[in-house]
């Protein structure tokens, strides 16, 4: 699905949220919330201090590959992934950084509290109350 051309640039957030493709994606995230949180927790538990992100990049690449994506890591350490090996036409790009300012000492340093918020060194709040803080 290419969502980039489905709505005009001037569409409101409400229009976007009501569009069939976006509504379907939001429903998927609702259904798969536990799986998404489990994958996120695994990712956060891979230490990635600045300039030492290789292990996390390899984990991310391997995880995406296991989901059927075509992946590679470029010379700068960026994980590149696409559903097709050489996608034609325009692409939608999602970017994020892999490093953390503070790295966990052990995997148990990263946890999820009762409210669903991720806790630990180098981890931002990701649960339902995260945006309120």
Image (tube, grey):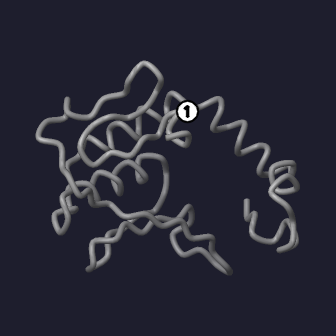
Q: Is residue 27 above or below residue 102?
A: above
* Residue closest to the far left: 105
Q: Mark 1 Cα within 10 Å, few/some/many (few <14, many 20+)?
A: few
Determine which quarter of the picture holds residue 119.
Answer: top left
Between 70 and 52, the one lying in front of the other is 52
Determine which quarter of the picture holds residue 92.
Answer: bottom right
Left or right: 12 with respect to 48?
right
* Residue closest to the far top: 114
Q: Residue at x 41, y 38 (%)?
A: 39
Left or right: 55 with respect to 82?
left
Left or right: 5 with respect to 109?
right
Q: Is residue 40 above or below residue 2?
A: above
Percent across and percent down for residue 70 are 46, 62
Q: Residue at x 17, y 43 (%)?
A: 104
Percent across and percent down for residue 7 are 86, 67
Q: How many marks?
A: 1
Q: Residue at x 56, y 61 (%)?
A: 83
Q: Residue at x 71, y 45 (%)?
A: 25
Q: Residue at label 1?
A: 128
Percent across and percent down for residue 79 are 37, 66
Between 100 and 33, the one lying in front of the other is 100
Q: Is residue 102 above or below residue 6?
A: above
In terms of secondary structure, where does tag 1 sit? loop
């Amino acid at each position: 699905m290419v969502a980039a051309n489905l709505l005009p640039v001037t569409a409101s957030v409400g229009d976007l949220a009501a569009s069939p493709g976006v509504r379907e994606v939001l429903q998927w995230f609702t259904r798969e919330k536990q799986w998404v949180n489990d994958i996120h927790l695994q990712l956060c538990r891979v230490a990635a201090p600045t300039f030492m992100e290789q292990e996390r990049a390899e984990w991310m690449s391997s995880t995406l590959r296991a989901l059927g994506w075509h992946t590679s890591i470029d010379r700068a350490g960026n994980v590149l992934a696409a559903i097709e090996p050489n996608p034609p036409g325009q692409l939608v790009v999602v970017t994020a950084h892999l490093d953390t300012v503070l790295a966990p000492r052990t995997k148990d340093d990263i946890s999820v509290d009762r409210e669903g918020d991720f806790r630990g060194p180098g981890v931002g709040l990701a649960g339902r109350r995260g945006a309120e803080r």
